[in-house]
Image: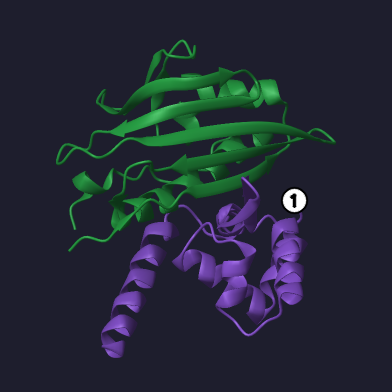
Amino acid sequence: MSMDAVFKALADATRRRLLDSLRARNGQTLGELCACGEMTRQAVTKHLAILEAANLVAAQKRGREKLHYLNPVPIHDIAARWIKRYERSRLAALADLKTRLERDADD
Amino acid sequence: MTEMTTESTVYVTYIATTPERLWAALTSSEFTTRYFFGRTVESDWKTGSPWLLRMPNGRVDVKGEVRESDPPRKLVVSWNIDWGAEKLPEAVVSYEIETVGGGVVRLTMTESHPTPIPAALLEGGRKGWPMILSGLKTLLETGKPLGIPVPQPPKERGK
């Protein structure tokens, strides 16, 4: 699995929004993913194909439907390449702090 | 009120190895101690047999039953997590191994929840599995573990 494909797939705001949507609710059908945006079905299909090719989205068949799942494993592989083992917990603490502060600001 | 969910989690990783080696990595302690947060696995891996995960301190924190065993293609196990406090509903974890050619296999891990579980708990798994699968890939491809510090189960970490 090429890292280039992952970076290219992520270098697009629309595709990142599709991943956000799956982050919020995993296992959505194409129809559900189309309903949350202003994109055509065709455009969503195209973006999903790119995300699938980069292994950022895993699709599973359930009956006649195809369910889409966020697959963060390639992102983890990227992080593992540049983040040192002892940095991980400090970075997690920072990310946690940022999330809390920004959430409080929203209230 | 605790938010409950029955959402499944599906993770896919491509590994430069053989299905037989990947099967061995999923089912033998020689491998799991190096990518599954130090845990050993115990089972004869026959359909209907019990299986368990043992922490480095000897405590068993996950156990269940082998639901389907088709080496080296498919393994389905039930998960009953024991983290001390409340008893959690059973989850089902399946591993599917497919050859994609060029010396690469595709591993699909699915965690499903027939009974609703607290959403926060699912979040825990979503942090853990990518580390486990990344570690498994690195171990099989390089022979070395990823070198991530061993996280403790959430209940014991204390917040």
Q: Residue at x 64, y 81 (%)?
A: A13
For residue B41, say whether it is visible.
Answer: yes
Q: How is the image coloured?
A: by chain
Give the residue pinned by disc 1.
Answer: A1
Quadrant containing the N terminus of chain B is bottom left
Q: How many marks?
A: 1
Residue farthest left in this picture: B85
Residue B53 occupies which quadrant of the picture?
A: top left
* Amino acid at circle 1: Met
**Quadrant containing the C terminus of chain B in the rendered view:** bottom left
Q: In the rendered image of this protein, does residue B119 appear above or below residue B139?
A: below
Judging depth in this view, the residue of B116 and B80 nearest the camera is B116
- Left-right relation of B87 to B147: left
- Above or below residue A63? Residue B34 is above
- Chain B in the picture: what colour? green
Q: Quadrant of residue A9?
A: bottom right
